[in-house]
Image (cartoon, rainbow, N blue to C red):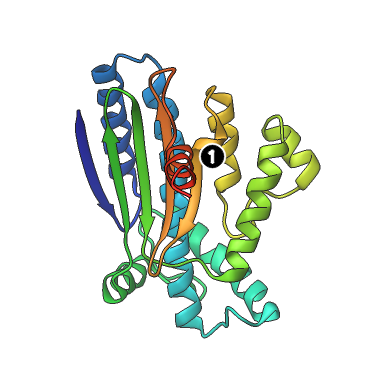
Amino acid sequence: MFKQEFEIEILDDNFKEKLFNYFQEVEKKIQKPGIGEIIFHIVYELINNAIKANLKRIFFLKKGYSFDNQEEYHKGLIEFRKSYQYLFKNKNGNEHKGLINKKEWLEALKDLGLKVRLVIDVDHNRILIYVINNTKMLPEEEKRLRESLSHAMKSKDLMDFIINYGQIDEEGEGLGLPLVILLIKDAGFKPDYFRVYKDEKNTIARIEFPLTENYIPIRERWQKNNYSNL
């Protein structure tokens, strides 16, 4: 039916409104009342996490923190969280108490070529969405991610997750990828349709929203096609 692509550096209020309006239009086209806002919140969280990953790389490089040293990594996360929160809470993003200012963040994103791509592909069977971040996950990050997603899959809802597994996202203020799983469940979709993986250069989040009862997800189709040839 249609396909749309966006490129994002910083998730500001203007883009947030643009994204919300876009999914409202998608809702009208596919005639599925309520689905636009649901998808917006899920995609917004995915983009937010991808941008955080890019900004964290910049922060660690500027401050000279190591990703391999556990003590330095945790110290860097604490300082990064302060800078990240200040960047988005302070409207002007000016320098404050040694934190990186907004201008520095944006210049570094451009210099390093760090960006997030959002690809939305809609047909009569499904809505297929990719959030592609050209910062590849490090082993420690992937380990934490898999653990968090596993906990979210076992949780009934957000409160159950918090009670059993504590803080949701130690790398920032947002609720992180576990919230995506919980939102998908709450919307009545299968969390199995959500995948996070990496290739040589990118970290990719893929999510499918079935629009028909007989929709077969990508992973299931791939397994069927490949195993049937063995």
Measured along the vertical axis of the image, is residue 156 above or below residue 48?
above
Q: Is residue 104 left or right of residue 181?
A: left
Q: Is residue 114 left or right of residue 153?
A: left
Q: In front here: 226 or 1? A: 226
- Looking at the rendered structure, the number of numbered marks drawn on it comes to 1
The picture places residue 212, in percent across and down from the top left corner, at 39, 18
Q: Residue at x 27, y 31 (%)?
A: 122
Q: Is residue 50 left or right of residue 160?
A: left
The picture places residue 8, in percent across and down from the top left corner, at 29, 54
**Could you say which quadrant of the image residue 65 lies in?**
bottom right
Q: Which residue is mark 1?
A: 180
**Could you say which quadrant of the image residue 200 lies in?**
bottom left
The picture places residue 178, in percent across and down from the top left corner, at 60, 44
Point out the residue furthest to the right here.
164
Q: Amino acid at mark 1?
A: Val
Q: Residue at x 57, y 63 (%)?
A: 81
